[in-house]
Image: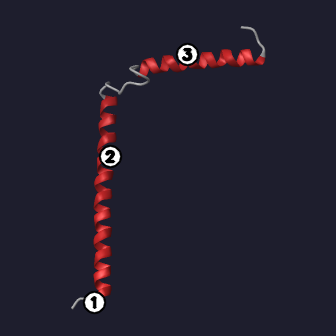
Amino acid sequence: MISESFQIVSAALFAVAIIAVASLRGWQGWLSLKTRELDLITAGRAPEIEGGAGSGMARIEIADLKERIRKLEAIAAGVDL
């Protein structure tokens, strides 16, 4: 007969193996997702940013936001533009 401690150890080892395999498959899936994202970026078909704007348009939006912040800071400091 198989001892009770051997059964517990073998069940624990089996559980650890299942968790390791599931984690490895999840990691490989995440890596393949990131690889596809990088392929899209290098192919020039980057995902759209901020509701349909491409990366160039996003830079313009960021510059516009920086200008607005500068104006608001000037208003808060009491400086007329």
Rendering quarter of residue 9? bottom left
Q: In the picture shown, does residue 9 fall above or below 41?
A: below
Question: Between residues 29 and 41, which one lies in front from this camera angle?
Answer: 29
Of marks 3 and 1, the one in the foreground: 1
Residue drawn 78% across the image and 14% down it: 78
Q: In the picture shown, does residue 79 fall above or below 31?
A: above
Say which residue label 2 marks. Answer: 31
Q: Are marks 3 and 1 in contact (CB under 8 Å)?
A: no
Real-space Cα separation, disc 3 to disc 2, in angstroms: 35 Å
Q: What amino acid is at disc 3?
A: Asp
Q: Quadrant of the N terminus?
A: bottom left
Determine the residue located farthest toward the right in the rendered image.
Answer: 78
Say which residue label 3 marks. Answer: 64
Question: Between residues 6 and 38, which one lies in front from this camera angle?
Answer: 6
Q: Are marks 3 and 2 in contact (CB under 8 Å)?
A: no
Locate residue 61 relative to residue 53 in the image: left or right: right
What's the image's color scheme? secondary structure
Rendering quarter of residue 13? bottom left
Q: Position of residue 3 (x, y in %)?
A: 27, 89
Mark seen at residue 3: 1
Q: What amino acid is at disc 1?
A: Ser
Q: Quadrant of the C terminus?
A: top right
Q: Secondary structure at mark 3?
A: helix
